[in-house]
Image (cartoon, rainbow, N blue to C red):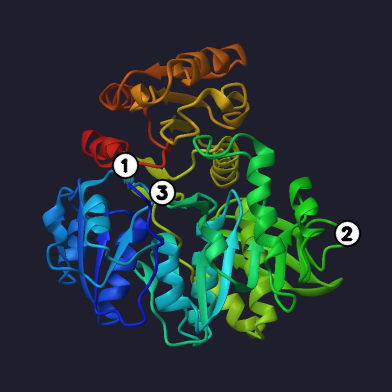
Amino acid sequence: MRLKQNRIPEKVKSIHLIAVCGTGMGALAGMLKEAGFEVTGSDHHVYPPMSTFLSERGIRIAEGFRPENLSHGPDLVVVGNAVSKDNPEVVRMFEMDLPFCSLPQALNRFFIHQKAALTVVGTHGKTTISALLAWVLSMAGLDPGFMVGGILKNFDRNYNIGTGPYFVVEGDEYDTAFFDKGPKFLHYTPSRAILTGVEFDHADIYRDLDHVKQAFVDFVRAMPEEALLVACDGAPTVRELVAQAPCWIATYGSGERSPWRLENVHFDPPWTHLEVTRRGEPFGTLKTPLIGLHNALNAIAVIAVADDLRIPRDVISRALETFEGIKRRQEVRGIKRGITVMDDFAHHPTEVRETIAAIRAFYANTRIIAVFEPRTNSSRRKVFQKVYPESFNDADLVCIRKPPMLEKIPAEERFSSEELTRDLKDRGKEARYFPDTEAIIAYLVTVAKPDDVILIMSNGGFDNIHEKLLKRL
């Protein structure tokens, strides 16, 4: 099959999305519907909450991928990232010569191109920073458009079309589609961008750290000269990248030469207090319910962009205080028998380490039970096998699940939860291996005590472990 050039027609009325139930594709479907397009979609896993979310908006979803799902001849087909060229609907799309594009192409064409894009990129922190920035803009009365990789509690959604001049977009370094193997973030031309840091991740598409860095090199080199790049000063990789940017630069962190400095952070639950300076002068002492030093850095990155947009300091301060966070980021799912069950999206070794350290700072005299499911394409591979043991230093008890879908990974590349458990024990850490989720729940019910914090980390649903555990408790 010869690959036709993807394109978006000048006039579009009806749009079909293949693999519509993903977080990003579902958000795009909702935005397109709100914008007045006729929207249909299909997926092979159609179930709540995304199926309910789409049906409530009048979006017809077909279960499974079938050629007849395109029989109505849509003006445009948006092809999801996980869809392959031999998908039955893709084959039919080519047979019908239907115009098609990727998610970032559609997002850029229909919602971003007439606004100033505020793009957040980096291995960690993208979702929190994007969400907080959107909330600051909203508090300033600027009604931003946004698409974020998590549900913003302040909005109870992860997208907004917005009537204001700005669009906040979480810039993903993952590849775009089967017909476009470049990173998604290259489809956006930011007026301001935040770069948090670059580490090796996505082992299924990147060979090594240099390969990842090249994607970010392409991003910073494409920044317009009049744009602003706000970059964290704490990572050597970021310093290398910033040197190649043709635009204005403002660094943030603890570096002496950074115009935005985090002078001091102290925790007084439920608040994190930040002392911030701007170009050597006090900017203010602000507080946020976000937990941890990494979130303090996320906050100062947002402050830097908000200040550049001339948002008053008192508005920024109120926004930080009233930000409710994102679902699945240090989210307390419930408290039973005095036992706190918390959910977090952490999966990369750095994220696991920083998340546990943040919880430790807020729950200083509490036993922290870390429950980890290696589920991503990287964490199911052994690329981080020797790195993960150090990530659990601040946990008191560690429960490691066998990676799900391990059969999809070549045998010689597979991550071993048993080996991680042994390595943790060798470091003097109490750790246990479990073959499945039910075994973890059965164990936790017997060992958890009042005042414990059970921190559950996975980028997936983890078999609904949170609700099952709370029910059993």
Q: Quadrant of residue 260?
A: bottom right
- Give the x, y percent position of residue 34: 27, 79
Q: CA distance from mark 1 to mark 3?
A: 26 Å
Q: Looking at the picture, tell me which residue is in the foreground, 458 or 411.
A: 411
Residue at x 55% of width, y 60% of height: 185
Residue at x 41% of width, y 42% of height: 459
232 with respect to 363 (left or right): right
- Give the x, y percent position of residue 205: 52, 39
Q: CA distance from mark 2 to mark 3?
A: 44 Å
Q: Looking at the picture, tell me which residue is in the foreground, 364 or 201.
A: 201
The disc, 1 or 3, on the residue closer to the chain's N-terminal end is 3
Q: Is residue 123 positioned above or below 96 on the image?
A: above
**Amino acid on which the number 1 mark rests in the picture:** Gly
Which is closer to the viewer, label 1 or label 2? 1
Residue occupying the far front of the picture: 2
Q: Which residue is mark 3?
A: 178
**Amino acid on which the number 2 mark rests in the picture:** Glu
Q: Which residue is mark 2?
A: 256
Q: Which mark is residue 461?
A: 1
Q: Quadrant of residue 220?
A: bottom right
The disc, 1 or 2, on the residue closer to the chain's N-terminal end is 2
The disc, 2 or 3, on the residue closer to the chain's N-terminal end is 3
Callout 2 environment at 10 Å: few (<14), some (14 to 19), or many (20+)?
few
Q: Looking at the picture, tell me which residue is in the foreground, 151 or 118.
A: 118
**Amino acid on which the number 3 mark rests in the picture:** Phe
Q: Which mark is residue 357?
A: none
Q: CA distance from mark 1 to mark 2?
A: 42 Å
**Is label 1 in contact with label 3 (beta carbons under 8 Å)?**
no
